[in-house]
Image (spheres, rainbow, N blue to C red):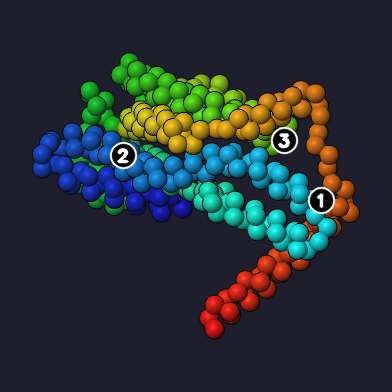
Amino acid sequence: MYEVFMYPVSGIMKFWHWLISSFVGESTAWLISIILLVITVRGVVVPLNWISVRSARIGALIRPENNRIKKQMNNATTTEEMAELMQEEKDLMKSYNYNPAAGCIPPLIMIPAFIGLYQVLLRMSNIERGSTTVGMLNASDVSAFRETTFYGAPLTDFAREHGDLINPILIAAIAFTMANSVISLVRSFRTTQFDQKVNRRVFILMGFLLLIIPFFLWNLAQTGPIPVAIILYWGCAYLFTLIQTAIFELILHRDYPLTEDVHNMRRKSIHRWRKREKEPALSKEEKKRVSRLRMEARKYLKSNNQQGEQKASE
């Protein structure tokens, strides 16, 4: 199962090692290949991460207007009125180029990349020297990688065996990821609707993870089967992510500043949450009525679009 993740990761490492081994020594080339692996994977994901961050900010910016439209939809009484509101909602999304599903893509790349790297290094740590291949790395590559050291510590050794060397890098990696998490948490706080249970719980979970992740990473590195190369990867990857997050935050502040309406919505949501107030919910009958109107409005809009296309073709 994990082989599918190992091949692209090992292929990237092999490519970078082949490219730079003519300029530096064998061991140095493998060390640099880990850094370049981080830059390659994270660099590919940067545009997708930006789309995700931008999408979340735009979702917050359009929320006041979108909520107004949704309230009017709940009060709509005719198919034409519902169709007009649905078209208004669609135009609002289109004007901001908003895609709520954009945030799902980056993890689909980063998680397999980390799994692939971990499996490559773990398997190279557990095999007989030079006896087999791992992913796209042949026996010669595996043997050379196993002989690569970082200040005397073999990259395939477990980190717990070299605490004095690895702990400073591990502490730096933890500091980078905590700083990144704090920036993300503050950004989330400024747009979270606290009177909505799911949003509030996600925010609380983020705060909880901020507290436990440092202990988890430290304990994992000190007691788990984590190779030295993984710690180096963590340090580089978390530094890259922190720089990326800081740059994204500056761009958001400059190009997509939160409006006073957004801030007021958040303040009101906190007030309602503290007062245990809830937005009046629709009854089952009203939900059915609104759902029926939306279905009829979709057919109405589809019919109008088809008629418009026919007239344009004539």
The residue located at (56%, 21%) in the rendering is 211
Disc sitting over residue 196 in the figure: 3
Quarter of the picture containing the C terminus is bottom right
Does residue 174 appear anywhere in the picture? no
Identify the residue position indicated by label 2 in the image.
Answer: 39
The residue located at (57%, 33%) in the rendering is 259
Sequence-first disc among 2 and 3: 2
Residue at the limit of the structure toward the top, as seen here:
164
Q: Which element carries disc 3, helix, strand or loop?
A: loop
In this rendering, position of residue 49 left or right of residue 104: left
Question: What is the C-alpha distance between the residues marked 2 and 1?
Answer: 51 Å
Sequence-first disc among 3 and 1: 1
Q: Mark 3 or 1, which is nearer the eye?
A: 1
Sequence-first disc among 2 and 1: 2
Where is residue 266 shown, x and y percent of the image?
66, 29
Q: Is the residue under label 1 in contact with that under label 3 (CB below 8 Å)?
A: no
For the residue marked with disc 1, what is the amino acid?
A: Asn
Q: Which element carries disc 2, helix, strand or loop?
A: helix
